[in-house]
Amino acid sequence: MTGVLVQSKLPLPLLRRGKVREVYEVDERTLLLVASDRVSAFDVVMREAVPHKGAVLTQLSAFWFDRLQSVMPHHCLTADVEAIVAWIPALASHQGELQGRAMLTRRATPVPFECVVRGYISGSAWAEYKQSGTLAGEPMLQGLVESARLDPPIFSPATKAEQGHDENVTFEHVARTLGRNPAERLRRASLGLYEAGRAYAADRGIIIADTKFEFGTTPDGELIVIDEILTPDSSRFWPADRYQPGRTQLSFDKQPLRDYLADLRKQGKWNGEAPPPPLPPEVVNATSERYRDAYRCITGTDLE
């Protein structure tokens, strides 16, 4: 894997550029996803990139897609760059920049909801619960503390926001939008994937506190998992040996970046909007190490 990739430019039609990924059209049934090393926080993309971040997201997703394929089919065809170049010879001169961070996928029409599963109450769910005792407007058990375990885990869908934050919605909202049977299918698939992933991670000393899945339907009508799965960008990973209910937990993600920016906001040195402040090298390096730690702990191998 070579250097840091801020933005890919490939000889393929670019369908969209997100905060992290570029999505290219290969043909009418196939896409190429390239995960850059861009990083965002508070919905603002930073100027500095985080080394290895894109490779962690791609390779960890490939790991989980392979491991959980018996639970739910997925869109990944291959994340092996040599196989990708063999499929798309025009990319031969780009093999270096794509190494480790590109995934060839089946094309699918995305379901218009984030399928969130919460096994612990944290983040926006904790903020709402602390204020009103609810989650997406629905009453929760009384007396929960921050980071408390939820048994059973809760399916907590959200809208997909083009700008700003996703908005938590009820299951009934999803059922009214998509139909009850498709909504039930999404809930079963999400909970099944989460339970299988959580059990595996627990054996490796990691708590998957919550996660979000994205689903899509293929031209043949098959429901599959798309985008990324059980990565530090889509999940909260907590070291089990440091877990303590009643407080915010240490996370294997961009916590060093968020902590640094939150401190700047408290000091009145940044208003939380673009343009972002410059990041010190130690913050960038600490964030990179968190991503690589997550990959190492879950897969049992170092990122190549």
Image: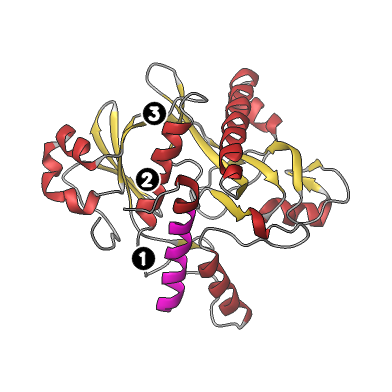
Left or right of 64 in this view: 252: right
Q: Which image quadrant for residue 156?
A: top right
Label number found at residue 184: none
Q: Is mark 1 on a helix, strand or loop?
A: loop
Q: Which numbered disc, 1 or 3, marks the residue closer to the eye? A: 1
Q: How far across and how far down the image is residue 86, in percent?
A: 15, 34
Q: Which numbered disc, 2 or 1, marks the residue closer to the eye? A: 2
Magenta stretch, main secondary structure class: helix
Q: Is residue 242 magenta?
A: no
Give the residue pinned by disc 3: 108
Q: Within 10 Å of the Cα at label 3, are there few (<14), some (14-19), or many (20+) other Cα atoms?
A: many
Q: How far across and how far down the image is residue 181, in percent?
A: 62, 18
CA–CA distance in space, label 2 to label 1: 18 Å
Question: Where the N terminus falls, by quadrant?
Answer: bottom left
* Residue 50 seen by the camera: yes
Give the residue pinned by disc 2: 59
Total labels drawn: 3
Q: Which image quadrant for residue 196?
A: top right
Q: Is mark 2 on a helix, strand or loop?
A: helix
CA–CA distance in space, label 1 to label 3: 29 Å
Left or right of 278 in this view: 267: right
Residue type, mark 3 in image: Ala
Q: Is residue 172 above or below residue 220?
A: below
Q: How far across and how far down the image is residue 52, in percent?
A: 35, 59
Which residues, given as a range, are shown in magenta? 277-294
* Residue under the point 11% across and 49% down: 93
Give the residue pinned by disc 1: 49
Q: Within 10 Å of the Cα at label 2, are there few (<14), some (14-19), or many (20+) other Cα atoms?
A: many
Pick whichever, 79 or 10, lies toward us.
79
